[in-house]
Amino acid sequence: MNYAVGDQVVHWSFGLGEIVQVDEKVLSGKSNQYYVVQMNNLTIWVPVSEKGERSLRSLTAAGDFRKTIRLLSGPGEPLPVDRFQRKTYLAEMMQDGTLESLCRLVRDLTFFKRLKKVNDTDNTILDRARKMLVNEWGVTLAVPTIQAERAMNELLAEG
């Protein structure tokens, strides 16, 4: 998918941003085009190539977003008890970058946290995933992020 300046996108690691420019840079003697994505106080350059585009996705359409967030109220699926296996699994879910994976990660890690003590890495991943979800929620459904966070917490409490 080709993006244009002004498009809002979601980066699998950094979350919601806006393409502010398409820039050409020479790295290691090779010239490549990059999307310049602005995210609050952070600017990242994402290759326009297919590989780079897989790290970006468009915002989810409002109707699809409403359907997908219902996953938050479902029963949590078990996560690996071993912290290294869990870290690898959660990293793969984040890298998948889809809204569905993000919802499942938030749901499952929240459920896991209710039953077991979690480590700093788990908490960091959960905080980042929650923030990404709430930010996209706010923009996609045109609601304040505090309202999106409340709604997310209500859905998670149902699970």
Image (cartoon, rainbow, N blue to C red):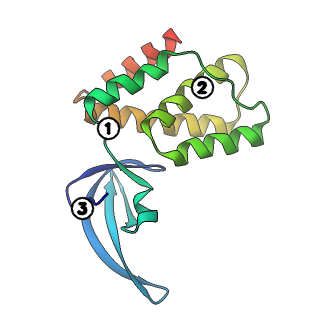
| Res. 20 image quadrant | bottom left
Q: Where is residue 43 in the image (x, y as percent from the top left)?
A: 36, 61
Sequence-first disc among 2 and 3: 3
| Secondary element type, mark 2 | helix
Q: Which residue is drawn at 44% across and 56% down?
A: 54
| Res. 121 image quadrant | top right
Sequence-first disc among 1 and 2: 1
Sequence-first disc among 3 and 1: 3
Q: Which residue is drawn at 62% across and 40% down?
A: 90
Report which residue position mark 3 lands on.
20
Q: Label 3 is placed on what type of residue?
A: Val
Circle 1 Cα neighbour tier, 10 Å, few/some/many (<14 / 14–19 / ≥20) = some
Report which residue position mark 1 lands on.
60
Circle 3 Cα neighbour tier, 10 Å, few/some/many (<14 / 14–19 / ≥20) = some
Q: Nearer the viewer, mark 2 or mark 3?
A: 2
Q: Label 2 is placed on what type of residue?
A: Asp
Q: Position of residue 50 (x, y in %)?
A: 42, 64
Lateral position of residue 34 relative to residue 118, left or right: left
Disc 3 and disc 1 in contact, CB within 8 angstroms: no
Q: Is residue 53 above or below residue 143?
A: below
| Secondary element type, mark 3 | strand
Q: Where is residue 109 in the image (x, y as percent from the top left)?
A: 61, 28
Report which residue position mark 2 lands on.
108
Real-space CA distance between mark 1 and mark 2, rounded to the nearest whole angstrom: 21 Å
Quarter the N terminus occupies: bottom left
